[in-house]
Image (spheres, rainbow, N blue to C red):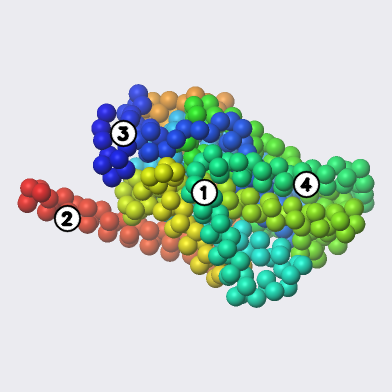
Amino acid sequence: MAKNSDKNVNLEFDSNNSITAESEGLKRELGVLDVTTNVLNITIGSGIFLLPAIIAGILGNASIVAYVLCGFMFLLVVLCFAEAGSRITTSGGAYAYIEKAFGPYFGFLANTFFAMSGVLLGAALLNGIADMLSVPFLIFDKLFFRGLLFIICLVLFAYGNIIGVKQGMKVAKAATLLKVLPLILLVVLGLFNLNANNLHWQSFPSPDELGNASLLLFFAFMGGETALNVSGEMKNPRRTAPIGLLLGVTIVIVFYSLIQVVAQSTLGTELIAQKTPLAAVAGKLAGNWGMRILLIGGLISIIGSLYSGIFVFSRIFFAGASDGLLPKYLSKIHPKYATPHWSIITLMVLAFFMAISGGFRQLVILASTSMLLLYFGVALAVIKFRLSRSNRYPALFILPGGIFIPIVTLLILGWFLSQSKPNEIKATTIFIALATIVYLVKILFQKKAAIIKAATGL
């Protein structure tokens, strides 16, 4: 057993000589229900409350096709995450899987993209909160008051995440219950009042239409897999991670599809013009009280997603810093609460500046593109683990069909990424180039420091 003086915690290794959660200074307190709750809480957010109208504007009555396609694709992605998560049980999620499979450079790129996607997701959710509040309170359309709202939300959520995992999970479970109940009632009421005429579509969407809609809609599905970022805080993660993740995502896919059917059935062509589509659906089905309940439920939903998002994405900063990829201060653990407090605070500050510089739709596209690249890397990592002769990271959960599912996942993800606009591809390429330069400079300085240390004997 070795000692890490920076964190003042004991380093412990598993049978594969990999650092365990105890070495990270984190407590293993999360079970299957906690992971499933995090999946639901992170995923069911602003996307399903705000995107149905946008998707209907692109695909009309055929919107359900995009939900089926995204749901199927995301299930494949999650299966890859489930196997990878049963192999690698430290914090970091996709970053940890890619780094273990392909080495420090690709790990650095994955960590950078993952951290940035967390910032973008947080910024998008903050704008989602402001957009929903701007319906009853027009003052939140003004930048000053939006910024003030962002600061209040971030301070409260950062504090809640810093004080501990158990306290955070209590908030997450309460938010999940409060956000899901109104949606369940909406689905039940809508299914009893189905209008088949509003669900009829005469032709299949074109590939371009389906691609554009799917790239936007993907935002509504993504995020649940980040529940594995906190594998270092799970009880028996090799079992807890895959079961909790698959259960949560399956619930989300079915739930989303039913919500879109109800929205399309209830509003028909009116759905396209709605700023808060599900609140409008509730208003038509249950009057003003129904609309108010859904608006409140939508706010709770986005707040819950942001709260859980802070929880899981801050661990990306923490994991990257622990591995020497990010500034060391991000790996500090709070002496009382045993949480990565500086990672949480840094994520909040970056999300604030990103939130005031962009709108919901623009941030959604950027976040989706970043996450798609990460998913691509995870599917490749599963293939690499499978083909490796050393079996250094044995899996508790093994996908059927060998590498067939990861290969199909890569093909579908490649199609999704091909739907990106030229300026988005250009921005991504520049980002990768800049990250590569930073990595090379970092390696150069590390080598120089090592040479100086060897020469001076310090």
Q: Which residue is mark 1?
A: 161
**Do the numbered discs 1 and 3 sit on residues whose CB atoms are within 8 Å?**
no
Q: Which residue is mark 3?
A: 10
In this view of the protein, which residue sits in the foreground, 136 or 452?
A: 136
Q: Is residue 184 left or right of residue 27?
A: right
Q: Residue 27 location, x and y as percent?
A: 44, 35
Residue that protrudes farthest toward the left in the picture: 456
Name above or below for residue 183 compared with residue 389. Answer: below
The amino acid type found where label 1 is placed reads Asn
The amino acid type found where label 4 is placed reads Leu
As helix, strand or loop, the secondary structure at mark 2 comes to: helix
Measured Cα–Cα span from mark 1 to mark 3: 24 Å
As helix, strand or loop, the secondary structure at mark 1 comes to: helix
Q: Is residue 205 left or right of residue 19?
A: right
The amino acid type found where label 3 is placed reads Asn
In this view of the protein, which residue sits in the foreground, 314 or 108?
A: 314
Q: Residues within 10 Å of mark 1 (few under 14, many from 20)?
A: many
Q: Earlier in the sequence, mark 2 or mark 4?
A: 4
Q: Residues within 10 Å of mark 2 (few under 14, many from 20)?
A: few
Q: Residue 299 location, x and y as percent?
A: 70, 56
Q: Earlier in the sequence, mark 1 or mark 2?
A: 1
**Do the numbered discs 3 and 2 sit on residues whose CB atoms are within 8 Å?**
no
As helix, strand or loop, the secondary structure at mark 4 comes to: helix
Visible residue check, residue 75: no
Measured Cα–Cα span from mark 1 to mark 4: 26 Å
Report the mark closest to the observer, 1 or 4.
1
Q: Which residue is mark 2?
A: 448
Measured Cα–Cα span from mark 1 to mark 2: 38 Å
Q: Residue 260 location, x and y as percent?
A: 78, 49
Q: Which residue is mark 4?
A: 183
Residue at 50%, 43% in the rendered image:
164
